[in-house]
């Protein structure tokens, strides 16, 4: 397998692994919004709170999942660019929280590491895809 093909395969794996992650949280958001909030020890107090978590984690998460699968099939580079921004901004939001509110707990710290690694992977893939040209659009 040549280098360009390897980058294409790795990029698809990156997109689909991320899609799977968002899909799992999305399904949890749709079917058990409280389970999502239990991860950060927050009790949902009313139906509007359940609806909001279901919408953001369920609906938005599923939209992201669908788009990642589409990009894995139709436009790998666009998907990698999107994920690079997404994971990077997730990590940035945790760094801002750390700076403003104080140190993160175990959950936040673990996810800061995961999001940072996914951001770095995305950035490396993005650079390699750009160097390889437009043949990665399909």
Image (spheres, rainbow, N blue to C red):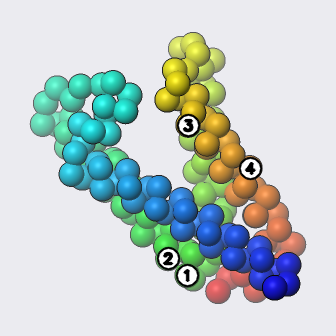
Q: CA distance from mark 3 to mark 4?
A: 14 Å
Which residue is tagged 2?
70
Which residue is tagged 1?
73
Which residue is tagged 3?
111
Q: How many marks?
A: 4
Mark 1 or mark 3, earlier in chain: 1
Q: Position of residue 68 (x, y in %)?
A: 51, 68
Q: CA distance from mark 4 to mark 2?
A: 22 Å
Which residue is tagged 4?
120
Mark nearest the camera among 2 and 3 is 3
Q: Is residue 136 shown above or below 25? A: below
Marks 2 & 1, CB-CB < 8 Å contact: yes
Mark 4 or mark 2, earlier in chain: 2
Q: Position of residue 39 (x, y in %)?
A: 37, 33
Q: Position of residue 13 (x, y in %)?
A: 62, 69
Q: Is residue 101 shown above or below 97? A: above
Q: Residue at x 16, y 36 (%)?
A: 48
Q: Secondary structure at mark 2?
A: helix
Q: Residues within 10 Å of mark 4 (few under 14, many from 20)?
A: some
Mark 3 or mark 4, earlier in chain: 3
Q: Secondary structure at mark 4?
A: helix
Q: Residues within 10 Å of mark 1 (few under 14, many from 20)?
A: some
Marks 2 & 3, CB-CB < 8 Å contact: no
């Amino acid at each position: 397998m040549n280098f360009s093909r390897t980058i294409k395969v790795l990029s698809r794996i990156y997109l689909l692994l991320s899609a799977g992650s968002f899909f799992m949280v999305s399904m949890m958001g749709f079917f058990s919004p409280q389970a999502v909030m239990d991860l950060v020890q927050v009790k949902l107090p009313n139906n509007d709170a359940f609806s909001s978590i279901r919408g953001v984690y369920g609906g938005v998460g599923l939209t992201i999942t669908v788009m990642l699968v589409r990009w894995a099939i139709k436009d790998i580079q666009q998907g990698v660019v999107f994920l690079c921004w997404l994971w990077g901004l997730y990590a940035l939001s945790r760094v801002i929280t750390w700076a403003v509110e104080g140190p993160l707990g175990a959950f936040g710290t673990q996810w800061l590491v995961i999001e940072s690694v996914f951001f770095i992977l995305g950035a490396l893939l993005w650079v390699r895809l750009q160097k390889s040209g437009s043949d990665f659009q399909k």
